[in-house]
Structures are given as C-alpha cells and as structure tokens.
Amino acid sequence: MAKVELKNLSIEFGAFKAVDDVNLTVADGEFAVYLGPSGCGKTTTLRAVAGLQEATSGDILFDGQKVNDLSPSARNIAMVFQFVSLYPNLNIRENIIFPLKARGVAKAEIARKLDWVVDIFKLGGELKRYPSALPPGTTQKVALARAVVRDPAVLLLDEPLSAIDEQFREEMRWELGHLQRELGVTTIYVTHDQREAMSLADRIVLMNDSKIVQVADPQSMFFEPNSEFSGQFIGSPSMNFVDLIPMGTGFRLGDSQAILPAEAVPENVRTSKQPIRMGVRPRDLQLIDGAAPIEIELPVEDVFSVGRERFFTFKIGDGIAQGVDVRAEAHGPANSIGIRPEGLKFFDAQTGHRIVTHEAAA
Amino acid sequence: MAAVTQPRSAYLTRWFILALLAAYTFYNLGPILWLLVSSFKGRADLFAMPPVWIFDIDTSGYESVFGVGAAAGTASAYGVVDALINSVVVSSIGTVMAVFLGTLAGYVCSRYDFRGKGDFLFFVLSTRMLPPVAVLVFYHLMFARLGLADTRTGLVLVAIFANVGLATWIMKGFFDGVPKEVEQIAQVNGYSRMYAFIRLVVPMVRGGIAATAGFCFIFAWNEFAFASILTTTKAKTLPVKISAASGATGIEWTQIMSAGVVLIIPVLIFFYLIRKHLLMGMTFGVLGRS
Amino acid sequence: MTVTDQSQQPTATKRRSAATDKKKSSGRMMILGFLSPTLLILIFMVAYPIISLIDYSFYNFSALNPHEGYKWAGLDNYTYLLSDKALWQRFIFTGKFVFVCVSLQMIIGIFVGYQLQKKFKGRDVIFTLLMMPMMLSPVVVGFLWRYMLNSEWGVVNYLISSVGLDKVSWLSQTTPALFAAAAADTWMWTPFIILLATAAFRGIPDTIYEAAEVDGASAAYKFFRLTLPMSAPVLFIALILRLIDSFKQYDLFFALTGGGPGSSTETVSFAVAKTAFNYFYTGEASALAVILLFIIIGLSMILVRHLNKMGDKY
C-alpha cells in the first residue's frame, strides 16, 4: 500500500502539453478516479504513474519516495488497460500467474495466490481456456485478477470497463468497488464516464485541457461544482447555463424575456461587477404547480415521462434548456417553471469560476 | 517508452546489440558493394592482395561483356547481348502471361467457392515448392521431342508455369482485399459479373497487378536451373551465360563481375518498385495484405 | 402468407430457381473459363512430368538413346539408390547444409527482425536495403561468394588474416565448403526471415508489452514467453519455406562450389542433375527425383495445413 503524490507534473509531446503542472495526493488505500473528456490528459497521467510515460518535469512519489526513474516493474504497481491486454498465447491460469512467475515467486506461493484470486473472481471454470474464447467482460475480470494477484502497492485502471457491454458493466463496477474496499489497495482509476466516477470514487479528480479542474468527493463534486466545467460535465442531463443580465429589479435570463427576481440572487453576486452566468441542474427545475419558491415565466415546450420522472424542455431565448420534475404528482405543461433556490449556482462568465455565495460558504 | 535510467549493464547490452546489428549490416551490404566495386576493376586490381580500395576504374569487364570498345570483335568478346535479349524476351512474355493467368485464377479463387478449390490452390502452390531438377529430368526429354529445346518459346513456357502459381496466390490476396459489394452493386445495377470484373475490380487492384508482375519478372529473370539444362546455344539466358564463363580455361572474373552487375541492375530497379509489397510477394499473399 | 398466394407459389419458386440456376451456371462458366488455362499449363508442366517421372523410375534407360531400351527394372532403381553410400553421403551433406543454414538464418533473422521492428530514423531505408540479397540471382550470389572466398586473393581471407587468424581454404575442403555455402545461403536468405519476423513482431500490440512491463517481466522473459510464442505461426511459415528451399538448393552450389571438392558438396538436387544430365542414367535420376519430391511434398503438406489454419486468422 502506498500514498501517491504528483508534484508539478507536466508531460509534453513536442509542443503539445498533455499534462500541465498537476499536483495531487492520493492517500493510502484511497480510490481516486480521474474523470474528464477524452484527450484531457487523464490517461497520460496514469501512464506516468505507471512508468510507461516519461514525465517532462515534476515528480511522482510513492510514500514520499521519488519513483520517476524507476521502471514500471520496479514500482510495484499493477495496471488494467482499456483494451484487452491479456497474453493471447497463454491460458487464463498462465495469464493470472504471469506477474508472479515473471518475478520468480515460489511455486507454493503461486498456487496459493492463484486459488485466492480465482476464488474472488469466480474464475475456476475458465482457467484452462484462452483469452480469445472469453467474452470481453470476463477478460477484464482476468486482467483485474492478474493485477491484484501479487498485492500491488498501487492499482492503476485505465477505463477498464469501457469495452464491456452495458449490462455487465454495472455488475463489474459494483464488484470492483467492493473488491477495492476489501483489499484496501490505493487505486487510481481513469474514466470518461461520470456514473462510474460517481459510484466508485472516494474522490474524483476532474481534468480538462491538461489541467485538474476540481478534486472533491462525488457528493461535493455534484452539489458544489467549483466551475462551469464541473457543473456541466457532472450530472445527467447536463446543467443548464444562462447569462444573467441586470435589469431593473431583477435579472433578465439571456436573450429571453424572462426575469429572475433579484431576491433569488445572493448579495455578493448581485453586487458583482463581473458578468454573471447562472447554472441550474435540470432536477432543480419543476413544472410549475404553485409550489415552487421561485417562478419564472418560460413556456414549456415538450414533456415526456420516464417512469416517475418527467423530462421537459423549454426555451430561453434561442436556446433550449432541460428540466426533470422528480415529483410524481407534478402537473402538466404551463407557461412558467419553478426553481429550487438552493439549486442556483453562479459563475464568473469570463473565467468560468464559481462565485462562492454567502449561503454556500456558510 | 519507459522513463527509466538504465543500469550500466543495460547500456552494455544496448551497445552489444548495436555492434551485432552493425556486423550484420556489414555482412549483408558488403558483398553487394564489393561486387559493384570489383566490376570496375582491371584484372590486376581484381586479384590484388591485400585488396585495393583505390584503383583506376577499368571498364574492360563491361566492354568484353557487351563486345564493345577494346573488346569489340575480339575472341574474348563475351557476347552477352544475345543472352540479354533472350532474358528480356523470356522474362517479359513469361511475366505478362503468368500475371494474366494468375489474375484470372486468383479472382475466381477469391470470389467463388467450388469443389476442389483447396486442391487447386495447393496444386498451384506446388510450382513454388517443386525442385526444378525433378521435373527437368522429364522436360529434357519432352522438350527435345517437341522441338522446344534451346528455344525461347520453351523457356517462356517454363517462365509461365514457374510463376503462375505465385501470381495466382498474390492476386487472390489482393482480390480478397476488394469488398464483395463492388460486384453486388454492379449486378444490382444490371451489369454482368464479367463487366464488373473487368471494369471495376481489375482497376482497383492495378497496384497489386504491378507488384505481382514485379515479383514474377524478378524470379523469371533470375531463373537458372531450367535455363541451364534446356538451352545449349541460341536461347541461353543471362544467368546461364554468366555461369558459362567458368569453364575449362578458368573463370573470367572481370566478365563475371560486370555481367553480374548487368544482371542485378534490373532486379534492383524492380525490387525498388515492389518494396512495399515484399511481405505479400514472398509469402504468396498470405501475409502483409494492405 | 395468405391462401390465394399458394396458387402462384410454384411458378414463383420455379422462376426463382431458374434465375439462381442461370446465375450458378454463369458462375460455373466463369470459374471454368478463368481456371482452365492455368490448370492446363500446370497439368502439362507439373502433373504430366511427375507422373512420367514416377513411370521412368521403374525403368532402366538413358535419355541419350531413348529408342534403345526401356528395360523394366521394377524397384531396382530405388534399391540401388538406397544402398548407394554415395547417395547417403549427399543426403547427409544436404541435411547438414539445411540444418546449418536454416538455424543460422532463423537465429540471425529473428534477432535482427526483433531490433528492426522498433521505429527509428532511417529504419525503412535500412530495412529495404537489407532486403536486397534475397532478390538477387543465386548464380550471381554463388560467383560473388566464390570470388570473395578465394583462398589466396579473396577478401574474406584478407579480413580473417587482418585480425590475426589463419587463412582458410574455403572451397577446397569439405567442411569449410559446407560453411562457405551456408554463409552464402544465409547471406541471401536471412533477409527473408527478417521480413517475416518483423511483420510477426509488429503484429503484437504495444499494450501487451506494457502489461508485461507492469507485470515485472524482464526483456528476456517478455521475448521468450510472449514475443516468440505469439509470432510462432508466422515464424513457422518462414521455417518451413526455408527448409524446402534450402533442401532443394541447386543454383548456388552450381556457381559456388560446382559440387566440389570432389563430390563432397553435392546436394540431392545436384545429384539428380548430375545423374540425369552428365551420366544420363535417366531411370536412376527419375527414382532419385521421386525421392526428393516426396520429401518436398511432405514438407509442403505441413506448410499448407498450417497456411489453411492461418487463413482463418489473418
């Protein structure tokens, strides 16, 4: 087990900065999930931790020891790759014990370890088969078994579930989280799927454009996005954004005619000199039935139900926004929508940074 | 690549590997360079010990090969020109025919399933495996009986048979790379299979046909065993002519070196043209499809 | 399907089957038309000669005077050949030659191929240059090496003596001549192994190596446990092809040693040619050719079975 630290880590490919001055500490036994759109530098960071990618500058430390110059095999890490990387010429049993044999572990120990992981992953029936004969879900299970079989200090997972069927992915995700807690191994997991991140992570590391945007536990990440990007990337459907234009007693919403009453906007935001953008998650919007504290005149365009939830769209000027009314008793389309005031987030329209309101700070 | 500072032993290993690679490169390229250099040496320089690296360029080898210059009309005139013409004629016609037949057979084998296809392909491949001397025992008699001995026609026949198998396999590989939808769309639009083949599919594998031709030409051009047994005077090809320079009176090294260069120049040109398809050509189209 | 349709069904089926019949027959015409020229040539140039060869091998006769006598000899030619010590010598020599040069080619080819799979500046140019020898005429190669291996003024002996070793009479002693021929054949055909090995190695995805690196495998462990087994199917093709080609090698020896010194570097192919065209023991040569053919066919069968398996994969 180990604590992993990244200090001012930068990785460049020619003129392109794939990772730009990243600082992060992953605690011993923590499950950290790197989340971000493709090309944001999350996989590159992971490969640098593994030793498969050279750091241009900055340090990588395991338990305070610099490991920059250590080969992957000397770092005591294990890794599961996005695309299947089982050894096709070896059967499942040989695949699983490969890391032990490569390190010259004694036979009795190998047998003991093999029994242990086979038991965990329920692979008993597959040992004699070859990777090409297994479905992708099972091959990733084997890859995971191969990774944990020798008690690595750090477990690195590069989008391990993305090649698996939706149905099976859910199950694997659950097993993976369970396993990690059981083993207590420091884990860094890379994904672009926010649901994976939300359900697995102790902490999410959100990356965009080669930089870390926000590091937070899933709940805070969802409820307190520190920037427009966090708000927009996390949550489904995506957060709605609209510019606030000061107008008389309130704020006009973008190029629509709807007015947000001034009292809905916190004091420090109201007095800010910067242009303001407001974000609100669809689930903080309601089809109006007289119950909402804030009401805005925006005609609802379309409503459809998915189970208990009612998805609706409405126009703000030229743009389309989306809401989800989660109350089973909600009423039908109307000319205005309701907003839960705690759902309103305000951002500096220029920098994208969250403007911390007094309420939130308190 | 891994970001690791290597221990000393890793550096030593790397240098050792580089040294071995350099040695192999020297072994591989040295003889060809030595052939080129030696072909411009006069008799004295050719046998100098230690070998001379700087010498007066002497083209007497080439002159006697082509029977020009000082060697014009002399008894030592090597008279390679006739053999050269034989080689060009036999290899060209043989190549064109082999590629033509191979294209037809390769297409059918790529597109249709028929009884005995596997056997046919094996039979065709056997031409690549066959030891020439084995069939030569019979050819020798048959050619004499049919009046084909020492004729270009006979050698063309040999060039076709020796290369048609290769051409079939390589072309099958190239046709396999053309999607079947090409013919299906053409047929849906009312064109015949034949039309689709000639007008659509063949133009799509032009590059493959050229590469196949390149291989066939090289093999036909280099062919020695058949030509050496089946020709005596008129139809001698260049490889046979070269081997004839080692006779009872010793070996005419100046001529052999120069004739050798003359023989390999077309090969190198064709080799350069087909270099991208080398893998496919050397494995009957099984590997290296692209 | 409704009831009223049934009355029309037979005609519809008939029409459809007529159409497929027509299609099938046009396909058959195309198969026949496209294959028959090749088939005819191969029957005339391969099947017919081989059958005649087998026939000849049971007769005692000479091509010099074919009219004089086809004397039925039964298995005499074979029993004579198999009890002939000189022939066994040729088989042993051929075997030695095949063993030496194929192992050299495989070892060097796999080594160089493994190094050349990596990308580096100028790799493609070097790679193409290294491929040249296998395209050259074996006769030219034979003479070139004969020139370089000359014991007095050959450049090989010059290089050997310049590092302080004794000169070797390469082509006038049996064992050195074997190695000389192996050196020339290896020179010519190692590039072939490099070509196939590189292709095989490049077919292995990088992630496999990265996974192995993370798993703590040393370079040697990776090579022997992963690289070699994973490229084995392609390397096997290379091996069998080289076995076949070196086993039937003729041209190179013709130019390099001429079978000498004495008849000590005569391969089986060489012996066939000599028996048939120098001594004109046509019957005996046919029997020997049949034996040679069976060995080659055996090797080819292994190859073809393997190719068929590969065909599904590649």
Image (cartoon, rainbow, N blue to C red):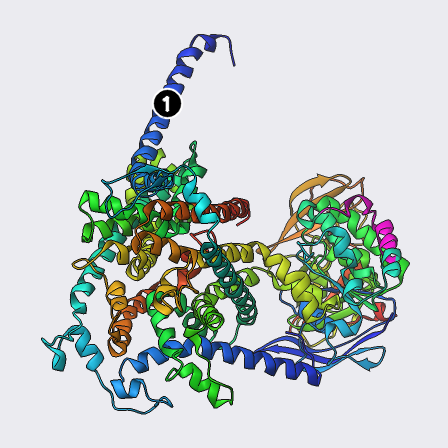
Residue at the left extreme, as displayed: B73
**Quick check: is A238 in the magenta stretch?**
no
* Residue C226, quarter of the rendered image: bottom right
Q: Could you tell me what secondary structure mostly forms the magenta stretch?
A: helix
Residue A68 as seen in the image, left or right of residue C238: right
Q: Front-most of C158 and B27?
A: C158
In the image, is residue A302 above or below residue A232?
Answer: above
From the top left corner, tell me how far across and down residue A301 is, in percent. Answer: 63, 45
Q: Front-most of A273 and C35?
A: C35
From the top left corner, tell me how far across and down residue A20 is, in percent. Answer: 67, 77
- Residue C171 visible (yes or no): yes
From the top left corner, tell me how far across and down residue C289 is, in percent. Answer: 40, 48
Q: What residue type is labelled 1?
A: Asp
Question: Which region is colored magenta?
Answer: A113-129
Q: Front-most of A65 and C2?
A: A65
Residue C248 as seen in the image, left or right of residue A41: left
Which residue lies at the image location 19% right of the left edge and 64% below the top edge? B83
In the rendered picture of this protein, how many numbered marks are placed on residues? 1
Q: Characterize the local packing of mark 1: few (<14), some (14-19) or many (20 or more) Cα atoms within 10 angstroms.
A: few
Q: What element carries label 1?
A: helix
- Residue A243 visible (yes or no): no
In the image, is residue A278 above or below residue C310?
Answer: below
Q: Front-most of B48 and A346?
A: B48
* Residue A209, quarter of the rendered image: bottom right
In the rendered structure, the residue with mark 1 lies on which chain? Answer: C
Q: Which residue is the site of mark 1?
A: C21
* Residue C117, quarter of the rendered image: bottom right
From the top left corner, tell me how far across and down residue B240 is, in percent. Answer: 26, 63
